[in-house]
Amino acid sequence: MKDIWIKVIEYASMPHLGLSRKLRAGYSIEFNGDGKVMDGDVVFEIYETYLRVISEEKGEVANIYYDWEKLASVKTTGSPKKK
């Protein structure tokens, strides 16, 4: 499933500062149905064994780490901006 989750994240994001990716404007993302919907300045770093998600919570930087093997679902909401 890891390859599928990477494709979902790639679709909802764009390249950002080297190898990381940033959530596209107008999109939000939620992992494992945990109710924590992330939007805005969300950065993803994709590693072999885990996914690092960097976001802002209450004015502070939050780092969340997901084990690929324990990632059960990824929900994206939004659509690309129309030209």
Image: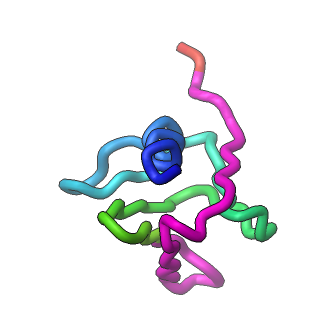
Q: Residue furthest left?
A: 18
Q: Position of residue 77 (x, y in %)?
A: 71, 42
Identify the residue at image location x=58%, y=83%.
59
Place residue 34 in its image quadrant: bottom right
Count of marks placed on residues: 0
Q: Against 43, is 76 above or below?
A: above
Q: Which residues are magenta?
A: 54-81
Q: Position of residue 60 (x, y in %)?
A: 53, 86
Q: Is residue 60 magenta?
A: yes
Identify the residue at image location x=70%, y=49%.
75
Q: Is residue 46 magenta?
A: no
Left or right of 7 on screen, residue 82: right
Q: Against 33, is 61 above or below?
A: below
Q: Against 80, is 25 above or below?
A: below
Tell me which secondary structure the magenta stretch mostly adopts: strand
Left or right of 16 on screen, residue 10: right
Q: Nearer the viewer, residue 22 or 76?
A: 76
Identify the residue at image location x=50%, y=42%.
4
